[in-house]
Amino acid sequence: QVKLVESGGGLVQPGGSLRLSCVASGFTLAYYHIAWFRQAPGKEREGVSCISERDDTTVYGDYVKGRFTISRDSAQGTVYLQMDSLQPEKKAIYFCTIPLIPEQAVCTLDTRLYEYWGQGTQVTVSS
């Protein structure tokens, strides 16, 4: 059974940092690219970042480039999202997700391509 469990969210001041983790089980993470999405209250889910399984190629949403870093430790079944220089944000939920089919090589930030989702971890950036 595929399971994705996010953690690391919380309340942080603008300009601060958080490190999110996504622990994967029930499948071999090394065969899948994996992505982070976020959803703010009243808004659609949007792509934050993804990392491919073949060569760890990364993709970032335009608004996070240069501030967030995605990484993976396939041996530990864990993916991380280091978030720096955080901007004010009200209770956004960050989700990790994988597609249905493994070994797709190139990751994208299209929600329609992802099948399995975690429950999310909440991030609030406020002073």
Image (tube, grey):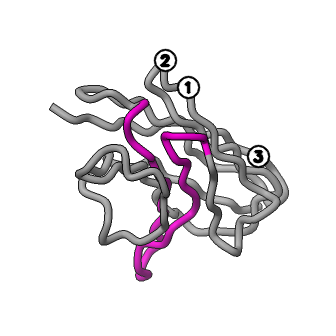
Q: Nearer the viewer, mark 3 or mark 1?
A: 1
**Magenta-colored stretch includes residue 45:** yes
Kindly indicate whether the residue at mark 2 contacts the one at mark 1 (C-beta within 8 angstroms). Answer: yes
User: Where are the magenta residues, as a range?
Assistant: 30-56
Q: How many labels does the image show?
A: 3
Residue 65 coordinates in the image, percent (x, y): 75, 65
Residue sitting at x 58%, y 68%: 90
Residue 78 coordinates in the image, percent (x, y): 49, 28
Q: Mark 1 points at which residue?
A: 73
Residue sitting at x 24%, y 56%: 115
Which amino acid type corresponds to the residue marked 3 in the rendered image? Ser
Quadrant of residue 86 within the rendered picture = bottom right
Residue 40 coordinates in the image, percent (x, y): 48, 72
Residue 5 coordinates in the image, percent (x, y): 36, 36
State the mark number for residue 17.
3
Residue sitting at x 36%, y 69%: 111
22 displayed left or right of 5 = right
As measured in the structure, the alpha-carbon distance from the residue carrying label 3 to the one carrying label 1 is 20 Å
Q: Name the residue under label 2.
A: 75
**Magenta-colored stretch includes residue 105:** no
Quadrant showing the N terminus: top left
